[in-house]
Image (spheres, rainbow, N blue to C red):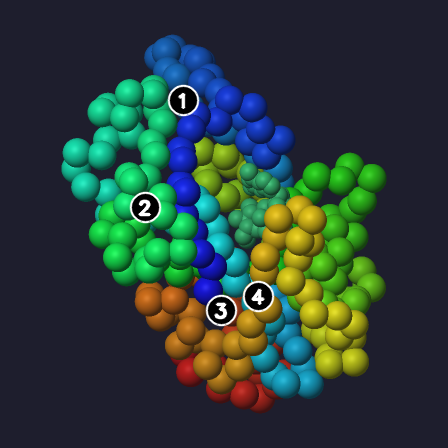
Amino acid sequence: MEQINNIQVVPCTSSNYLKAFTVHYSQNGTKKSWDFMQTHDSVSVLIFNTTSHCFILVKQFRPAVYMCEWERMKPAHADPEGEQGDEGCATAGPEEEQEGSEEASRPHQPPASAGVTYELCAGIVDKPHLSLEEIACQEVLEECGYEIPVSKLRRITSYRSGVGVTGAKQTMFYAEVSDENRVGEGGGQPQEGELIEVVKVPLHEAMTFAYDESIPKTMGVIFSFMWFHSNMAPKYKISTNV
Ligand SMILES: Nc1nc(=O)c2ncn([C@@H]3O[C@H](COP(=O)(O)OP(=O)(O)O[C@H]4O[C@H](CO)[C@@H](O)[C@H](O)[C@H]4O)[C@@H](O)[C@H]3O)c2[nH]1
Ligand SMILES: [Mg+2]
């Protein structure tokens, strides 16, 4: 379990990952404006291990998810844009800053598990010299430890994510792997700060997993499990409990 402490929230003024803008425009003669962020497109891969009949997912701490929970649990007086003084900044109170103290003893800070989500293996498209498929295969290797050629990828579809905020394009692939393709532990690239746990979801538990709201997960997981159910499950002649 991760230990999350020393939380400080500051305005994001310069980032390699996102840029915030306001666009002013006219729609059918009416002047409008909209705030949005430019981010990278991304790829994701539904991985099915044919040896163990399990889906291979990744589990990782997501600061954005955690901060939603942090906001929710914050006492009313701890307004980041109000009483903290620094514009738009928030710092955890003194009791939150003691390293190593029990998370349960911090009434205003959610446990780290509140920010951990189950996701498809995925990555941002930030290498112009590589195809979407090549980036997807790199992520499968780095995050999950399976080495597969691009020919093993089947494109499921692409769609827009965060249409109110980013509108970035995500492309989803499907890949069947076997234990023989496993060449490493996965886990992401520690030098880039990635700390990823590889988890297996047995095929027969997939739909129960997908609809269990107590398990935080992305829409990609739910959609891809349903895609598998209607497109691939008959091939494996296994009920997925829909
Ligand atoms: N985002 C960001 N902010 C930082 O401040 C920040 N600082 C460092 N980094 C580094 O960027 C890399 C991002 O990792 P990936 O390429 O594996 O992309 P994912 O984070 O897995 O995101 C994908 O999968 C998600 C789940 O399906 C989708 O929601 C996304 O759309 C989709 O791109 C890591 O090396 C991370 O250390 C930041 N990355
Ligand atoms: Mg990733």
**Residue 55, horizontal then vertical, whole percent:** 58, 74
Q: Which residue is mark 3?
A: 226
41 lies left or right of 31: right
**Residue 43, horizontal then vertical, whole percent:** 64, 51
* Front: mark 1 or 3: 1
Q: Which residue is mark 2?
A: 96
- Front-most of 170 and 217? 217
Establish if 143 lies above or below 97.
Answer: below
Establish if 192 lies above or below 2.
Answer: above
Q: Residue at x 28, y 39 (%)?
A: 93
Q: Which residue is mark 4?
A: 197
Query: Label 2 amino acid?
Result: Glu
Residue 36 in view, yes or no:
yes
Quadrant of the image for the C terminus?
Answer: bottom left
Q: Residue at x 33, y 60 (%)?
A: 102
Q: Residues within 10 Å of mark 3 (few under 14, many from 20)?
A: some
- Front-most of 241 and 66? 66
Residue 172 in view, yes or no:
no
In primary-sequence order, the first of circles 1 and 3 is 1
Is the CB of mark 2 within 8 Å of ligand 1? no
Query: Label 4 amino acid?
Result: Glu
Q: Secondary structure at mark 1?
A: strand
Q: CA distance from mark 1 to mark 2?
A: 36 Å
Q: In terms of image quadrants, where is residue 105?
A: bottom left
Q: CA distance from mark 3 to mark 2?
A: 41 Å
Query: Label 1 amino acid?
Result: Trp
Q: Which residue is mark 1?
A: 34
* Front: mark 1 or 2: 2
Q: CA distance from mark 1 to mark 3?
A: 34 Å
